[in-house]
Image (spheres, coloured by chain):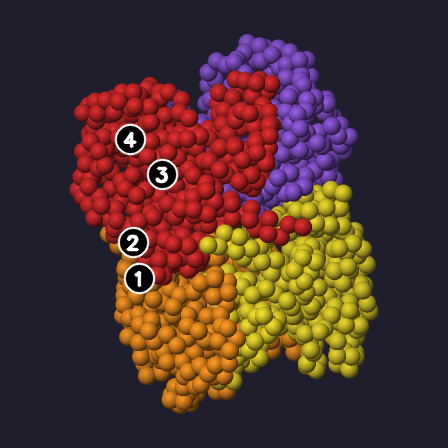
Chain colours: A yellow, B orange, C red, D purple
Amino acid sequence: MSSSFGTLFRISTFGESHCKAVGVVIDGCPPGFSLSTEDIQPQLNRRRPGQSALSTDRQEADQVIILSGTENGKTLGTPIALQVANKDHRPKDYGDMLDIPRPSHADFTYQMKYGIRASSGGGRASARETIGSVASGAVASKILQEKFNIDIVAWVSSVGQIDASPIDSNVITRSDVDTTIIRCPDHEAAAKMEKLVTELKERGDSVGGVVSCVIRNVPIGLGEPTFEKMEAKLAQAMLAIPATKGFEIGSGFAGTRMQGSQHNDPFTKKGDRLGTTTNNSGGIQGGITNGEPIQLRIAFKPPATISLPQETVDFSGNSAILEAKGRHDPCVVNRAVPIVESMAALVVLDMLLRQEARKAVQF
Amino acid sequence: MSSSFGTLFRISTFGESHCKAVGVVIDGCPPGFSLSTEDIQPQLNRRRPGQSALSTDRQEADQVIILSGTENGKTLGTPIALQVANKDHRPKDYGDMLDIPRPSHADFTYQMKYGIRASSGGGRASARETIGSVASGAVASKILQEKFNIDIVAWVSSVGQIDASPIDSNVITRSDVDTTIIRCPDHEAAAKMEKLVTELKERGDSVGGVVSCVIRNVPIGLGEPTFEKMEAKLAQAMLAIPATKGFEIGSGFAGTRMQGSQHNDPFTKKGDRLGTTTNNSGGIQGGITNGEPIQLRIAFKPPATISLPQETVDFSGNSAILEAKGRHDPCVVNRAVPIVESMAALVVLDMLLRQEARKAVQF
Amino acid sequence: MSSSFGTLFRISTFGESHCKAVGVVIDGCPPGFSLSTEDIQPQLNRRRPGQSALSTDRQEADQVIILSGTENGKTLGTPIALQVANKDHRPKDYGDMLDIPRPSHADFTYQMKYGIRASSGGGRASARETIGSVASGAVASKILQEKFNIDIVAWVSSVGQIDASPIDSNVITRSDVDTTIIRCPDHEAAAKMEKLVTELKERGDSVGGVVSCVIRNVPIGLGEPTFEKMEAKLAQAMLAIPATKGFEIGSGFAGTRMQGSQHNDPFTKKGDRLGTTTNNSGGIQGGITNGEPIQLRIAFKPPATISLPQETVDFSGNSAILEAKGRHDPCVVNRAVPIVESMAALVVLDMLLRQEARKAVQF
Amino acid sequence: MSSSFGTLFRISTFGESHCKAVGVVIDGCPPGFSLSTEDIQPQLNRRRPGQSALSTDRQEADQVIILSGTENGKTLGTPIALQVANKDHRPKDYGDMLDIPRPSHADFTYQMKYGIRASSGGGRASARETIGSVASGAVASKILQEKFNIDIVAWVSSVGQIDASPIDSNVITRSDVDTTIIRCPDHEAAAKMEKLVTELKERGDSVGGVVSCVIRNVPIGLGEPTFEKMEAKLAQAMLAIPATKGFEIGSGFAGTRMQGSQHNDPFTKKGDRLGTTTNNSGGIQGGITNGEPIQLRIAFKPPATISLPQETVDFSGNSAILEAKGRHDPCVVNRAVPIVESMAALVVLDMLLRQEARKAVQF
């Protein structure tokens, strides 16, 4: 059940990087709304490798098909199975790595946990596993957008030591984000980031970065204390993405250095609701949304697979030099943008459905 | 079900700050091991307010009783109900806040979500809710320690702008941590932190901080990809603690600024297993433990309840000045130390049980 | 988590027959509705032993207290902990049975499963465990009744070979049921049943029986295909009651002997909805309620604990004669009536909340 | 999540009768054991329509493919996606039924629950939905058989008024069962049953029946009190099968007519374990297996879709005569045999894994 996520809008993903197909089953999708592959494909396209010179050269069409759960373009309320075929699988590339576990990759831990592992290495630890999340997240996003006007936008805010200038998260759009290949809307910083990634690709090295995300127009009252507080489920969702090492909501770690009198968000009247004048809370107080934008930052480590030779040991403990030959990305943050948006959408829609159930029977 | 946590070792907590009792039901505790209140009380004592001049003056005995699930000091394998009576409840202290939601507290969001809230404000958003987690976490810790030699130690690594020097996380003990009131084992930094907190208490202000945590001797192979990766469940667990704003595993946000060739943890032979020479991964690769210590950092914002007057609005949107009169902590990180340890224990034991089930039927 | 039940209205029960207390935590109870112990106590009184000469002589007050989740008599939407103290525990009565597992009781299986068991024998297999279900079921029933006009009535339809005449399940009330001690509204049959039970009590033997249950005014559309069909969750709920051996919905086993042309329930116009002219379906089609009354029958075996000497073996396999000395009921069906009603209420309310969530976001 | 079932071995099914494919994702399958389509196909063949003159004429190849979770014929421990294409879909056959809900079918309730329904009627209420359960149940059965020597055999014990003679459930095999088309090992009764079904097929009517099932060599100690007692989960599993109306374990409803002194199963020494001389308990006491065979009986109503004209009303409430034209089975019990076996396997394996987790950490 660990490949499932959500309570009322629940996804179950499947697939390794070199099996026949990867995909997802969505259980609990609301019935009667329009759904076609065109609603899903754009986010898969933003996720897939080979979009630009910055990422791996693998050409994967990643065309999604809808196997079940819709008829005449409408959802039936029944499980929606989405599938993407694995076309380009060249397991021989990974041959060298059979005996030498790649440092900081999942080869070793998968082998130890399961007593077996896919020939390609991590299997489910592959970024390819995220196709199921992105496909189902696109469905969730569509419902949130069309029915509740909630929108979710992520972007790259740093790559290595290069930080983007602050973005106005109230207005940024996915189109803005896509104006640069690296998906950083600060064009000056973006140019530096792209240059760095290109250099690292040539050197056979990799680099980390930070993805920021805003969720706007969230209704007040979403999130389920105690253990399914909105930020707790968002944290789980984001740390489930491969290569993530950190999560911040609102003021994050910077907030720990502040005093309460600075950090507190005073209330103010905003139209017919209360809002806050600042948003150090990041849109959540006590685990429950307060109507302000939810603001997240997610840390991605440098990809583990690099071509530079690495001194390590093989599975038997013998010294070895590993030079990875497979295709790999020097930096994953631009491709992570739609993944972050998708995970956010899955959390928010599930919480929204749960709150609707409560409201419907309130006394 | 959002007040429940865990799959095989599952807790369900209950209680607000001013009801008759708070507590927890543990479902799935292994049978036949010794358990008495003495196993649980020490962590509750470390959590409770009034331990020192640094925290609120409320004197709460917080004596735990075991209602069910044991006989003759042994666990039966049946649900263990643990309960702590609420003795000191003075709701009148909170009277002023009925009309004015405290900035950055949960008064507003609880009221909006449920259409009702406890007179004391946040109800379940109170730190008192964590008693259930700490009591059940103490049970989990005991099993981990006695049966598997896994130990978990947390400490304060920063308060406001004051950072402790790096700690050797391989050897630090809970006793080391408790040598200072602020629970920072760097005594020089601790003195500064305590001075700051005392000043802020006098000023009626508050401050944030960071709690670090290490989990040692974790078996290789724990964690359930994809959505219940070890770091994902730890992130959920930590962000479910009141006042948390951030989470890091291993290199965390600092790792985003590094290159793969620096960040990767090369394998090496360590006794009869493979280990790594560095630990940027923080003990987890691909969502699965690799045998190295798990290293976490959790960000706590400054407590929202301060005595300094705050300009805000009341529930109706009218301008108001709030001067909180209740008792409150200027800094929560020292009391958060056992909470962090408890949440970590709950995650690790649950993952361990799940992996044991897998190993038992492995082909 | 096996002592928890429900998805959105979720209970977690605890307690053996001889620990300090038994009880339940309700998670997901709708906020803002009136709740006091008076809403819960009547069903506990109907469940408790010692109500009449027909049942065990143990006098258990079974007074419920509300520990959390309400304030000023209103639910807060937070977990509601309900507790009943265990007052009359005389473990010495069970002394003889320590070495000889009672035939058809849970002594043996609990010992084998957990490697330990409560001195009283089954521990959680005791009927006392049902207090948590009945207390939480009373809360669910109140919400169903007051907010949705759904009512649930169970009664005894057979004891041993004595069958009651068919009851009009459209009009029967709990008051009707309580007009006889055995809770069979057919007074003539009830007299025979009570005579039989009295005789068996004197002989030290026991007898089984059937409890029927009707759930009226259920909204159309409740039940979650595929594995949480309404009848599937009702079946789980009923077979979780101690001593149950069978379950029927609608035509049940008798329906297997019919032909489709006889068994099908033709549709007809009933006010502003479609209804059916017959109800072999028992109010459910395809796992989803159709607006007709849900009709159940649950089989209860004769209680396993009897005073008549039984030839058996002890735990070591040596021949032994067991003469149980403890207090025990010769027939449990009359006390099972409120348990059946409670389990039904828990299922229906949970399904209702889940359907409300769906309706709220329907396109 | 209602299309998911199980805790550690968890399935999620998808697919309607006329979408592109039906299937299942298995999460939590033990790693490292051999698995190919040959392990799965036989049970799908036993389930599929068109096996004999007794069932519908639809020819559905129902060839399963494994999309993920295995490599080189071994399970990886990752989610296993199984899929069967829908080849023969002729929605026009159902055209007449668009306006007239079939009596006792799910057309009406699906429409009312979801506000939309598949053109073929019930969609997920179709027997075709059971393909996912049967495919995953075959995987579970293989593990139970090969690793634990547990075998599960179901057979038809009655059709309409025709009852088979008692079967020796200690020795019956699937081969025995398959010696007759109707899957009743009592050949004399089978001949009568087949004759009846043939007649009903000609008349356009249908008939119900009972499927019995035995699970042998179950380890002592499986089943999770309180709400996931072995019989409770089996009851849920069986009542989730389309067209089921009743469930019995052990003595079932007949046991309600007995006295405790007759019904109790005395213990006896059986090799190195305790067993019982009779088995009215049906292999389960207090929700936990006792090592004796688990014995079940499941009631199937006559199929709702018949060709005989039926007086009913359309969705608008107008009188109508329905003459179903589609292909349909006059009796489903023979095809239900592998479905019952599959659901039983899913429950038993999940319970076994959960008990193994407990045993592994027992003190």
- Which mark, residue C179? 4
For the residues labelled 3 and 1, the Cα–Cα distance comes to 27 Å
Q: Secondary structure at mark 2?
A: strand
In the foreground, B161 or C235 = C235
Q: Please state which of the two labelled residues, at mark 4 or mark 2, is closer to the viewer.
A: 4
Q: Chain of mark 2?
A: C
Residue at left offset 42%, top offset 60%: C76
> Circle 2: is it few (<14), some (14-19), or many (20+) Cα within 10 Å?
some
Q: Please state which of the two labelled residues, at mark 3 or mark 4, is closer to the viewer.
A: 4
Query: In the image, are marks 3 and 2 on the same chain?
Result: yes
The answer to whether B21 appears left or right of A358 in the picture is left
Label located before the other in sequence (3 or 2): 2
> Circle 4: is it few (<14), some (14-19), or many (20+) Cα within 10 Å?
some
Label 4 close to label 1 by CB (< 8 Å): no
Query: In the image, are marks 3 and 4 on the same chain?
Result: yes
Q: Which residue is mark 2?
A: C65
Residue at left offset 44%, top offset 53%: C29
For the residues labelled 1 and 2, the Cα–Cα distance comes to 9 Å
Is residue B316 positioned above or below C325 on the image?
A: below
Residue at left offset 61%, top offset 72%: A271
Q: Which residue is mark 1?
A: B20
Q: Secondary structure at mark 4?
A: loop
For the residues labelled 4 and 2, the Cα–Cα distance comes to 28 Å
Q: Secondary structure at mark 3?
A: helix
Q: Chain of mark 3?
A: C
Q: Which residue is mark 3?
A: C339
